[in-house]
Image: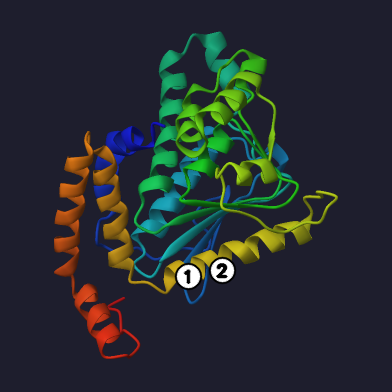
Amino acid sequence: RPSANMLCRTHSLAAALARPHARALSTAAASLVRADSRLDGKVAVLTLASARTRNALSEAMVRDLHAAVEAASNDERVRAIVLTHDGPVFSAGHDLKQVRRWQAEGNTDALGASFAATAAVARMLRLTAPPTIAVVNGLATAAGCQLALSCDMVVASNGSAFATPGSSVGLFCTSPAVAVMAAAPSKLAAEMLLCGKPIPAARALAFGMINYVSGGDATGACDDEAHRGAMDKAMELAEAVASHPRDVIAFGKRATARVGCAPTLDQADQLAGAAMVENCAMPDASEGISAFTEKRTPSWRK
């Protein structure tokens, strides 16, 4: 499983996204991505809002999502980010009409820039300081599957499915494979990439690819009620995350990324031990341990 290598390649982005300055979270962060806040601003909910295009990852959608994730990451109030969608498709992946136009033009620069921009957003979702939670109520396919599985946690409704069917149109899902191979066991990843058939949410859960199947009934209808059920579970997770000190969670994400890059178990242990010592020097660690020993509720810095 290449998850450690993926984290190692992208660790430098984590530092860039951990800048301490704050930026207010706007409820109109981008035209194709709605940004709302819950739990008194502690949870940012970002919604892919182009159901008409099946939330295809056009240049505009990727740009708007990048801006929305960055704004939420830089808002010091935000402890967790929930990524969800309008319509029956989380995201259909890259905008194949744009891809076809660039193919016809021989515009490899545009193709490369598009794939790189989508990969950058996926890295942001994995490495940004606030933990990220994807809520899928329908189909997450190709690069859309990549975005969902790049989040720290995934909640899907009963009728949802995940697919990487690129080979069916002659374009193998090589970029989405990075997230798929990090989230799924090797044999399931191979099946998804080589066969291209959708993997139902229940099967994804059984293999540990997602965290919860919540919302929807036995019919598998991906309706508003199913979406609300999945969102409720995601908000439970977000609230649990938000109860912890933001700086400690951010530190932990960065530290485990470094540990995951270690080539040997001994080096991993050394990096982890050094991180524990560094963590002990943080004000929230002093407060938390003091509160535990004094049998009181801790008062976090933020």
Q: Is residue 62 visible?
A: yes
Residue at x-position 21% and y-position 52%: 272
In the image, residue 106 above or below residue 61: above
What amino acid does circle 1 point to? Ala
- Which element is circle 1 on? helix
Q: Quadrant of residue 101?
A: top right
Asked if marks 1 and 2 touch (Cβ < 8 Å), the reply is yes
Query: Residue 164: x and y, percent?
Result: 61, 28
Relative side of 12 to 151, left or right: left
Q: Classify the position of the C terminus by image quarter.
A: bottom left
Instruction: Specify whether residue 94 is in view.
Output: no
- Out of 171 and 26, give the one closest to the viewer: 171
Q: Give the alpha-carbon distance from disc 1 to disc 2, as whole Å.
A: 6 Å
Task: Provide the residue designation for mark 2.
Answer: 236
Image position, residue 72 (x, y; %): 42, 59
Displayed quadrant of residue 229 = bottom right
| Front position in the image: 290 or 59 | 290
Amino acid type indicated by mark 2 = Glu
Establish if 216 lies above or below 6.
Answer: below
Q: Position of residue 42 (x, y in %)?
A: 45, 71
Secondary structure beneath dot 2 equals helix
Task: Name which residue lies at 22% across and 84% down.
Answer: 290
What x and y, as percent, mark residue 294? Answer: 26, 91
| Image point (33%, 39%), residue name | 7
- Residue 3 or residue 96, whichever sits in front: 3
Label 1 crowd (10 A; few <14 / some 14-19 / many >=20): few
Question: Would you call the spot at circle 2 few (<14 residues within 10 Å), some (14-19), or many (20 or more)?
Answer: few
Q: Which residue is mark 1?
A: 240
* Residue projecting furthest to the front: 266
